[in-house]
Amino acid sequence: MRERLLLLVESNTTGTGRLFARRAAELGVVPVLLCADPGRYPYAAEDRLRSVVVDTSDEAALWTAVRALEDEATIAGVLTSSEYYVPTAAALAYRLGLPGPAAEAVRACRDKAEQRRMLVGAGVGSPDFAVVSEVADALAAARGIGLPVVVKPVQGSGSLGVRLCADLDEVAEHAGTLLAATVNERGIASPGRILVEEYLTGPEFSVEVFGTDAVVTVAKHVGALPSFVEIGHDVPAALPGEQEIALRESAVRAVRALGLGWGAAHVELRLTGPRTAEVIEVNPRLAGGMIPELVRRACGIDLVRAQVLAALGTAPELERSGYARASIRFLTAEQDGILARSASLAEAVARARTVPGTVEAVLYRAPGEPVGPAEDFRGRVGHAIAVADRSVRAAEAADRAVALLGEAVSYADLHTEEAFA
């Protein structure tokens, strides 16, 4: 019998990228990572994941690689866990006659300027905005919208390049930096446009949507401004019923307005009134930040498995089978510092894992590695996950565990010998 393959077009470097491959294997399908550089994904070597090196930005080269795989096995599905490659994976699935989202819909959704226009056109609550390609236009937009404003790329992920600008000097500086970039962190060409948006206040949440069903609402914790680094999540969010309804209804309306409705969508919103939710953005993919793992532990719903099943043409399993509460807190550095020796790192992780309710505590960096304040997700140093029967208990346990992880970071002068002892 020919092997059945699940093609993974690139990946995120941690978290759900590894889980996609593992769930495929559990379902009896061979995961194959199509990527330009397998070295970006340490888990690929650790898990002995089959990889095919190909320029994933070159449609012809990608198709040639896929046709070669077809000669030896049956391609059963195509997915990606990377925001940047959702349109590529969708187009490839369509070309192969396999399940997936509408390629044009996800391509439009990936362009946050086009997404914003579509949401406004459909009457979905969202911030005032302007799309600009010159610093002078960014300044004019900021004046018109009213300071402070959020300035961010029209394409991106993980809060990369997203910044709150309090005055016109900050707008000019950050807009100039973004517009000067010719490629993003993945080496993909930048479009030469940015967004200037109204700054919405109020607590932030996400709604994890699958198809057109709101699965769960997640409370978000964001770090110190002017960056928007997510430093924690609580699942499910503890909310009054009317607020829960407002968030879920707005998220589903946004998904429908964008022509989505296949597989997972991660919708970020703010509550701007007692019963008013406005959409920050819609991501046509599973959430990052370990949210799928929190949902699995709290609700018994495996969103990664559901996404893999959908790609294989099988009905996903979305029935809730758990009623716990789960929280994650990310470790970020308060200032420039350095991680301790190996023994001290191991001790910090061991202590964090002793906190009642803690089910996971990890550090991402090596002993002696410098760390600094996070400006986006790449600045996270580690995380702790806790599960309990009440939201407050899960949150307190995660807070305590990540504080113990933080003892592995030394804020001594990096130029002194003590910092490297």
Image (cartoon, rainbow, N blue to C red):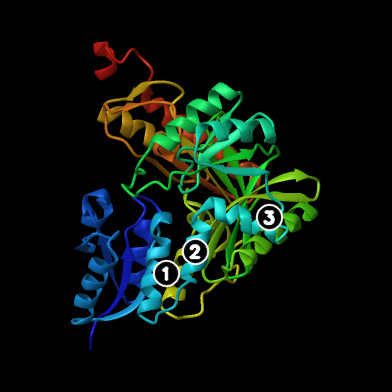
Q: Amino acid at mark 3?
A: Val
Disc 2 secondary structure class: helix
Q: Amino acid at mark 1?
A: Ala
Q: Residue at x 27, y 10 (%)?
A: 416
Q: Residue at x 56, y 55 (%)?
A: 114
Q: Closer to the observer: label 3 or label 2?
A: 3
Please give the label number shown on residue 417: none
- Residues under labels 3 and 2: Cα distance? 17 Å
- The image quadrant that residue 299 belongs to is bottom right
User: Depth check: 300 or 171 in front?
Assistant: 171
Q: Amino acid at mark 2?
A: Val
- The image quadrant that residue 1 belongs to is bottom left
Q: Quadrant of the C terminus?
A: top left
Q: Which residue is mark 1?
A: 90
Q: Residue at x 46, y 69 (%)?
A: 103
Residue 196 higher or lower than 308, as above or below: above
Query: Between disc 1 and disc 3, whose residue precedes?
Result: 1
Q: Which residue is mark 3?
A: 120
Disc 1 secondary structure class: helix
Residue 339 higher or lower than 261, as above or below: above
Q: Which residue is mark 2?
A: 106
Residue 323 higher or lower than 405, as above or below: below
